């Protein structure tokens, strides 16, 4: 179980190998990678800068991870989130979940992403092709995604 | 009560500072009280907190509601809804 906030890129293969090294109790590994797109809400962007709240970010990610472990039987998990300036095509976030069977790993990965998007203190600022900058607005769809987990036990 | 206040994203841009130490009067008891008190400190705070309903708060790294008590708080942060992931 680990969370990391970093400026540099991550290597998905290396992260999975590190997480599963020497383990023979893991039957399923799910990875989710969030990537920067070249457009958002119809607006072109050339780069995006991610700001966060050092200290709270790590605490919040740890709390979210702990909640996932209470709901599903996870053998291992990892959250890596990048900060700083990123360009279209760059990785933003990595979530890895490992379990004995796939259902728990799939569900926990989705849960971690839904919670991370509405609770972890990160803010995106986009730089547009027109030279303009704007803060990204929170999406109602993300709130709705997290609400569907409430009052629902882990499978 | 001396407390460290932090601002992030556009709240930071509008207040013009990332953090400050403030001495809160005794009557300031909740997060909403802190916002009301800050708004009285100058036009930049008035602007930053003009849409107070969209601003989120955290006490000592935990999300809290405007009605939350600030008793014992060391660090209070104000920021827009988060947009990570």
Image (cartoon, coloured by chain):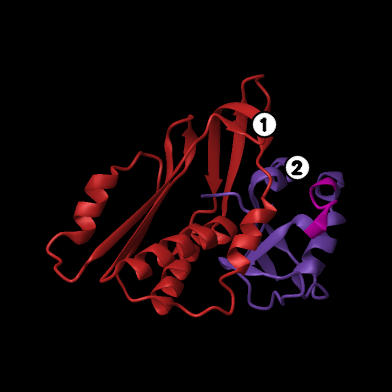
In this picture, is B80 found above or below B73?
A: above
Q: Quadrant of residue B63?
A: bottom right
Judged left or right of residue A32, residue B60 is: right
**Any mark on residue A42, and which?**
1
x and y, in percent, of residue A42 in the image: 67, 31
Q: Disc 1: which chain?
A: A
Which residue is located at x 60 percent, y 69 percent? Answer: A148
Q: Secondary structure at mark 1?
A: loop
Q: Is residue A141 magenta?
A: no
- Chain B shown in which color? purple
Q: Secondary structure at mark 2?
A: helix
Q: Between B15 and A25, which is closer to the camera in this rendering? A: A25
Query: In the rendered structure, which segment of residues is drawn in magenta?
Result: B47-53
Circle 2 sits on which residue?
A: B14
**Residue under the image location 63 percent in, 47 percent down:** B18
Rendered red, the chain in question is: A
The quarter holding residue B79 reads: bottom right
Q: Is B49 a magenta residue?
A: yes
Where is residue A61 drawn, in percent x and y?
46, 62
Which image quarter is the N terminus of chain A in?
A: bottom left
The residue lying at 61 percent from left, 37 percent from top is A125
Residue depicted at x 33% and y 63%: A77
Q: Which mark is residue A105?
A: none
């Amino acid at each position: 179980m680990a969370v990391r906030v970093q400026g540099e890129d991550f290597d998905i293969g290396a992260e999975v190998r590190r997480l599963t090294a020497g383990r023979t109790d893991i039957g399923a590994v799910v990875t989710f990678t969030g990537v920067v797109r070249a457009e958002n809400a119809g607006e072109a962007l050339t780069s995006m800068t991610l700001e966060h709240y050092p200290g709270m970010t790590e605490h919040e990610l740890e709390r979210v991870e702990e909640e996932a472990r209470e709901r599903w039987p996870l053998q291992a998990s990892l959250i890596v989130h990048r900060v700083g300036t990123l360009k279209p095509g760059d990785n933003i976030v990595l979530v890895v979940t490992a379990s004995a069977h796939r259902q728990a790993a799939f569900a926990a990965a989705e849960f971690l992403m839904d919670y991370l998007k509405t609770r972890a203190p990160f803010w995106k600022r986009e730089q547009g092709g027109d030279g303009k900058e704007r803060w990204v607005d929170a999406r109602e769809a993300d709130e709705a995604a997290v609400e569907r987990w409430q009052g629902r036990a882990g499978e | 009560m001396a407390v460290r206040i932090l601002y992030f994203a556009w709240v930071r841009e509008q207040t013009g500072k990332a953090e400050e130490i403030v001495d809160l009067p005794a009557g300031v008891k909740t997060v909403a009280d802190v916002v009301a008190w800050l708004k009285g400190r100058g036009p930049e705070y008035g602007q930053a907190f003009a849409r107070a309903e969209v601003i989120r708060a955290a006490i000592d790294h935990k999300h809290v509601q405007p009605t939350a008590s600030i008793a014992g708080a060391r660090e209070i942060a104000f920021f827009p809804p988060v947009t990570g992931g």
